[in-house]
Image (spheres, rainbow, N blue to C red):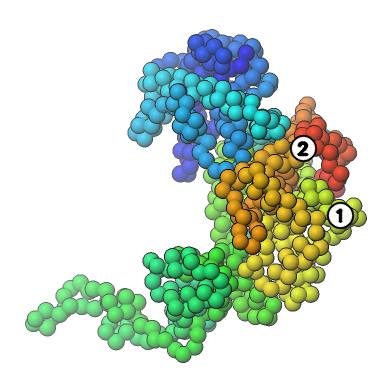
Amino acid sequence: MRLVLDVENTTQMRNGKWHLDPYEEGNFLVQVGMQNADKPEETFIVNIDHLEAKDTNGAGRKLIQDILDMTTLLIMHNAQHDLMWLWECGFKYDCDIYDTMLAEYILLRGQKDTLSLDGCAQRRQLTSQKDDTLKKYFKDGYNTNEIPLKELTFYLQADLDTTRELFHDLELDYGEVESASLHKVRSVTFDTCKTLTRMYMAGFCVDRVALDAVRQEYEQEKADIEDRLQHKVREIMGDTPINLNSPEQMSQVVFSRKVNNKKEWVQLFEHTKDKKEFVSAVGSNSTLIRRTKAFTCPDCKGEGKVYKVRKDGTKYARPNKCKDCEARGYQLKNTNVLAGLAFAAPTKKWVSANGFSTGKDNLSVLIGTAKTKKMDDAISFLTDLKRLSAVSSYLSAFVEGIDTFTKKDGYLHVSLTQHITATGRFSGRNPNMQNMPRGGTFPVKRVFVSRWEGGDILEADFAQLEFRTAAYLSQDAVAMAEIANGFDVHSYTAQVITDAGQPTTRQEAKEHTFAPLFGATGYGRSKAEEAYYIHFNEKYEGVASWHKSLADEAMRFNKITSKSGRQYAFPDVKRNARGGVSHFTMIKNYPVQGFATGDVVPVVLIELEKRLSGLQSCLVNTVHDSTVVDTHPKERGVVLQIIDDMNEELNDLIEKAYGVVMNVPLLLESKIGPNWLDVKDI
């Protein structure tokens, strides 16, 4: 039987965030709805725990399990949520699943559109539309089990009807000839959904003492950086007060210009065609700023407040703020010395509502320029500014995020979605650990430990997955030879940039090495870095030629079909006057990132979980091209052997999943240790 299923559960608000899963204290299953996908009259709504009806004798639970036992395909919209509740509540089901949300996502072919059940129904103009009866109840503070049973049941019935109709409509689309290549991708995606659900359920153990230590470490670092920056700001800006958290003021510090009219600023650059027009527009619509010197406000005598005087000469009891000095007690006088660092924004892409953007990517470019020009003070300032942004983000996104979403039992349940990115790559939330910095120096990783005394955290990381993927997809002879010979591409990148006049370490070079694979051109970067991007296309002629063929394919078919069968639509791609195409960055990026982390990684993740079956060791996370296993102390050797065995079969697994015969070897490298940070290569 093909069964449509949906669950209703209570939710809890904690630390300002909604918690929807069964691991949050106070959450429980309220209703389970089931409908035969081919005989909709066979619909069952089972009340588990509602204020008006409870399954006190277990008959409802038995009915659910009996129906699941007869089910060969379980159809859900956002299956991770429904599966998690079923499995955690003790129900058994391990046959095929069909997630209508993920099926629709694949058919969208990388195009952004809503994937909510309501959104899918409206876009497809289905007869059955999702009911919004409950919105008012939730807005009024009702929890799910408190909503009148009749209305909750009506809502659940409507969801079942809509999901069933959506399923049949999707299957018509998958029956089209143009969708034939998507079937294998869909199959892997559904299997991955089950693996990610079980990984979420397992949870990642958090050491709260270590988390507090990391918080204190970051807070101290943040304070130290702010002290250094404020000291430097006073030096280069004079007495002008600067808020380090203000994008507008930091733009003035870095670029030494103040926007004349903020309301018109961004629009002024929409039609600038070249560098000359851009520079002219900047000069005409912004003003160079000067260092300032403070002097005591003559009106308030430095007090920041003034008193009105009555006709008889007496002062009013309450003072007013001094308008001349804005209640500061001092006024500022411009000197003849240019303020700030006096950098020039290279392109109109740097224009923002506040002047020019000082985001991390732009700061990296400016640091490169400063290194080339040997501007030591600017290097220190910009490096600190970039680090301050990172540390602030780490505190809010990771330290606070981990604290908020770690349950009372000490486990963080890692939430990964498959439908957010255009390429099929996983996206994280609550918190998004996919955004963790690469490499083995991120202190937050130290808080993740084994659930077993004496246990280890093992990370199996693909070696140069994107590069190997690009080498295979393009059949670039140079890249394939470097992989075969173990050539150190990062050191080579560092040497090219250094030789071009910008001293660069191997670690610093890593962000550039494979960037051209994902569409980066080097335009707007420092001259030395730009030289590497040019060199890349000269060195890897096969990759450059493949990029051109992708552009031609997109122009001819308005889409690109990956080796795996995954498709990326480009409905409005156009050829420009110089022979290039629009959306070229995405055209180059999607096939590499999609095949590597959207197609290869899920297959390996599924297989690893399968081989861990029967062991106490379990998958607890996956980040981009790595997988993380909480390893039982008695199973360390077994898990390491599993990784070794899989290394002999990685290419075979890809061939089995997609029918793709790769002639470039894939490789997993293992690291293991007492926590996720302090792991050592095996």
Badge 2 or badge 1: first in the primary sequence: 1
Checking the image for residue 92, the label placed there is none
As drawn, 224 above or below 641: below
Q: Amino acid at mark 1?
A: Ala
Disc 2 target residue = 604
Q: Amino acid at mark 2?
A: Val
As drawn, 431 above or below 225: above
Disc 1 target residue = 477
- Hey, which quadrant is residue 569 in on the image? top right
Taking the spot 45% from the left edge, 23% from the top edge, the residue there is: 128
As drawn, 207 above or below 218: above
- Give the image location of residue 105, x and y in percent: 59, 36
Q: Is residue 121 visible?
A: yes
Taking the spot 72% from the left edge, 39% from the top edge, the residue there is: 599
- Give the image location of residue 193, x and y in percent: 65, 32
- Give the image location of residue 2, x and y in percent: 61, 16
Taking the spot 60% from the left edge, 25% from the top edge, the residue there is: 171
Q: Tell whether 547 sits left or right of 25.
A: right
Mark 2 to mark 1 CA distance (whole Å): 26 Å
Q: Quadrant of the N terminus?
A: top right
Label 2: element kind: helix
Taking the spot 76% from the left edge, 52% from the top edge, the residue there is: 546
Q: Is residue 213 visible?
A: no
As drawn, 3 above or below 303: above
